[in-house]
Image (cartoon, rainbow, N blue to C red):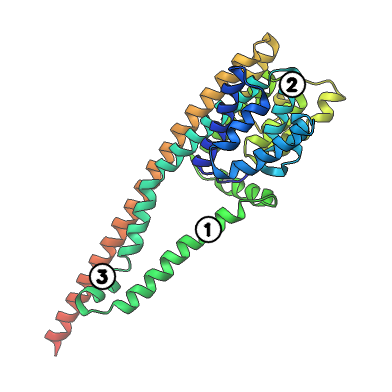
Amino acid sequence: MALLIMPRALAQRGEFYYQLSAMIRAGLPLIGALQTLEKSPPAASYRKPVQQMLAELHNRNTFTGALATIGDWLPVFDKALLEAGEKSGRLDECFRLLASYYEERAKLAREVMGQMIYPVCIVHLALLIFPVNLLVAAVLQDQWGPLLIEKAVAYGTLYGVATALVLASSGSRSSWWRATMEGILGVIPVLGRARQNLALARLTAALEALFSAGVGIVDSWELAARASGSPALAREVMKWRPQIEVEQKTPGQILADKNVFPTMFTSLYRTGEISGQLDDTLKRLHEYSRVEGHRQMQMFTRGLTIVIILAIMVAIGFQVVMFWIGYFNNIGNVLSQ
């Protein structure tokens, strides 16, 4: 899972599953639903994978077998959930769950990106203004060459770093990079907690969907941990299989012995596990983690905006002080001659 996924791609995936769910609920067979989507997919990139699935289904392959032929176009989480749905006869319900899952993720991504627009605009403005002496020289003395070169270097560096982060976090070899970034961002006040809560929101949404589809508890936890986008959570959960299958421990008991998950998460999960109301507990944990993640991300964005504004104000103040120091020094030199 890439560190950065655009909301539009997530929304298109949600629309794809929603249309499949709606058509199957209306009585259309799976092949007929896929044929309809082949003609009018959510995006042009969906047409080829849908054609491959249709070809496999026409050759009497199972839907699970058809999914295996499209490579990495679908995440492991989606394939596992759809396989469970096909085996349990609840494929339409799995499509509905995946539609809700991706719609929620698209909403989260839009909100986070929307909150970052203002700080990004301020950074661009600061890069445009500073250093002030070059801007003044360009306007008053028509020396535009040095200014344009400096701005090209500044904005080139900014966009170069941003592009490198996106490219490094994409693809199948990016796990080490995501883990490194998670460790670095995790120590930043407020932002670290916000990222953890948003990862837990994705984890609980995935767990609820997988449990509802009848996927085994170990497989559900492993797939949900991958879907969370947190390498730390995924590494921790991948150690659980021997404890659950050999030592006969429950996830709630394992959580109680670990410090990776927040105390409240562990407490509520164990309560839901013991009381047999795990589905309701996961919904509550998802909503709590989502709301807390949003609130903390908003706090971080506001704080970052204030820090940037204060830095710009200090820089402007420094420029003003240096201007007057130079001005009075020139007056002193003139008077001393």
Quarter holding the C terminus? bottom left
Q: Is residue 116 visible?
A: yes
Horizontal and vertical percent position of residue 136: 24, 72
Horizontal and vertical percent position of residue 181: 59, 49
Q: Is residue 19 left or right of residue 278?
A: left
Horizontal and vertical percent position of residue 270: 67, 17
Circle 3 is placed at which residue position?
322
Residue type indicated by callout 1: Thr
Q: Secondary structure at mark 2?
A: helix
Q: Secondary structure at mark 1?
A: helix
Q: Residues within 10 Å of mark 3 (few under 14, many from 20)?
A: few
Quadrant position of residue 141: bottom left
Q: Secondary structure at mark 3?
A: helix
Q: Which mark is residue 163?
A: 1
Quadrant position of residue 46: top right
Q: Which mark is residue 253?
A: 2
Between the residue at mark 1 and the residue at mark 3, the CA separation in whole angstroms equals: 36 Å
Q: Is residue 61 left or right of residue 258?
A: right
Horizontal and vertical percent position of residue 314: 30, 58
Between the residue at mark 3 and the residue at mark 2, the CA separation in whole angstroms equals: 63 Å
